[in-house]
Image (spheres, rainbow, N blue to C red):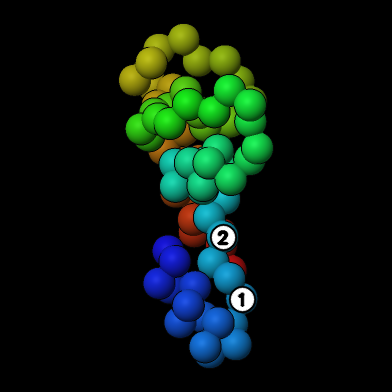
Amino acid sequence: MYGLNIVNRMKKKEKLIFPKETMIGCLADYISTENENFQPMNANFGILPQLDEKIRDKKLRYEQLANRALECLKNMK
């Protein structure tokens, strides 16, 4: 991502910022937000924003989170 932003800067294009609904966007937001109790972590579904509807089946919930992330990526500029 950083390398792409350097190329975009050289070409006078906009920065590439991933949506918070994606794992990389959520992790970037997590590490760049000030927090007194910051704890380094790996990627996990628990840090993604919750879905609008509550889904108890974990497999189905993770599938919906992944589908939402893909839709966000498709709708990026």
Residue at 44% across / 47% down in the picture?
Answer: 24
**Residue 9 in the image, given as x and y percentages of width and height:** 55, 82
Q: Residue 66, which numbered label?
A: none
User: To which quarter of the image does residue 75 belong?
Assistant: bottom right
Extreme residue in the top direction: 56
User: To which quarter of the image does residue 2 belong?
Assistant: bottom left
**Residue 71 in the image, given as x and y percentages of width and height:** 50, 50
The answer to whether residue 69 is seen in the rendering is: no
The answer to whether residue 4 is seen in the rendering is: yes
Nearest to the observer: residue 56 or residue 44: 44
Q: Amino acid at mark 2?
A: Ile
Quadrant showing the C terminus: bottom right
Q: Amino acid at mark 1?
A: Glu
Q: Which residue is mark 1?
A: 14
**Residue 11 in the image, given as x and y percentages of width and height:** 53, 89
Nearest to the observer: residue 55 or residue 49: 49
Residue at 48% across / 26% down in the picture?
Answer: 39
Quadrant showing the N terminus: bottom left
Residue at mark 2 to residue at mark 1: CA–CA distance:
9 Å
Residue at 50% across / 15% down in the picture?
Answer: 55
Q: Are marks 2 and 1 in contact (CB under 8 Å)?
A: no
Helix, strand or loop at label 1? It is loop
Residue at 49% across / 59% down in the picture?
Answer: 74
Q: Which residue is mark 2?
A: 17
Helix, strand or loop at label 2? It is loop
Within-10-Å neighbours for mark 1: few <14, some 14–19, many 20+: few
Extreme residue in the front direction: 36
